[in-house]
Amino acid sequence: MTEPGLGGRVAIVTGVSRRIGIAYTVARRLTDLGAIVFATGWPAHDREMPWGGDDVVDAPFPTEERDLEDPAAPAALVDAVIERHGVLDIVVAVHARSSNQPLLELTADELDRCWAANVRSVLLLARRFAERHDVSRRGGRLIWFTSGQHLGPMPGELPYSVTKGALHQMTMSLAAPLADLGIVANCINPGPVDTGYATGDDLEHVRKRFPTGRWGMPDDVANLVAFLVSDQGAWIQGQVINSEGGFRRG
């Protein structure tokens, strides 16, 4: 099989602020397939994290900083892309706020910020996309990402895992009205992906739990995204897809 082409399609990819990350790889793949890609990232988040920031200055697609915790940002993003290109066909929401708060360290502020960045922003992106999508165009797609919290506990990062759980559970309810507007929606659980956040013993411990003896890589995720946004992927709708490479939690 040859990879499906996306010539003439216009796409948003969020979360593009690290070249080693999933979002950058997805945006590059869609670009290679012929899509016009508009990427956003929020480097300030990465600079707060142990893995640090990475200025994406050599991307083969335009990239802007957009803080999707801001409730006005999702609609403004959709409007900006349509103003620039006239249409919008694909939204791949990869962005997420990470958080390492276990139960006894929970704060209301962190819970609110994870809700705003991880869940509310995706719903508001979906709303504005639905409002402005040209139903006469084929290829409407919306994809977002959950984590593995439905397959095993993630107690050390509760604000993150709980909001990722919300993204998982909202899939069918959000996909149904989007389908009526010509937008096929799905949610991906990519499993552990080596984007530079794990090091040392943690990196090795997780590697041994894959039957292939390697971590998932951003290209593995991009392979699935490329199929789902293609014409060949249109039959898959309203699904949470576990694409974990056989990762063993037991």
Image (tube, rainbow, N blue to C red):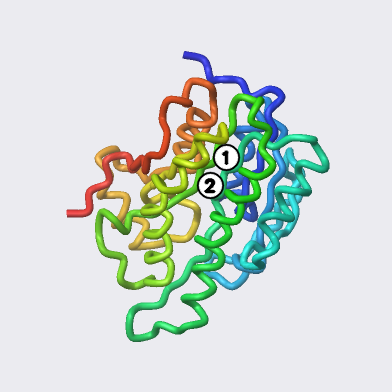
Q: Is residue 90 left or right of residue 119?
A: right
Position of residue 111 measured from the top left corner of the image (x, y, whole percent): 46, 76
Pick whichever, 220 or 101, lies toward us. 101
Which quadrant of the figure has residue 246?
Answer: top left
Position of residue 220 measured from the top left corner of the image (x, y, whole percent): 45, 37
Q: Is residue 173 left or right of residue 5?
A: left
The answer to whether the residues at label 1 and label 2 have Cβ atoms under 8 Å apart is: yes
Q: Amino acid at mark 1?
A: Val
Pick whichever, 27 or 49, lies toward us. 27
- Residue at 72% over, 33% down: 36
Position of residue 146 measured from the top left corner of the image (x, y, whole percent): 41, 53
Position of residue 76 measured from the top left corner of the image (x, y, whole percent): 74, 55
Q: Is residue 49 left or right of residue 170?
A: right
Q: Which residue is mark 1?
A: 26
Q: Is residue 199 above or below residue 103?
A: above
Mark sitting on residue 177? none
Mark 1 vs mark 2, CA separation in Å: 6 Å
Q: Is residue 228 above or below residue 80?
A: above
- Residue at 57% over, 47% down: 23
Q: Is residue 33 above or below residue 76?
A: above
Mark sitting on residue 22? 2
Estimate how packed mark 2 is, as few (under 14), some (14 to 19) or many (20 or more) residues with alpha carbons within 10 Å: many
Quarter of the image for the C terminus: give it.
bottom left
- Residue at 44% over, 41% down: 176
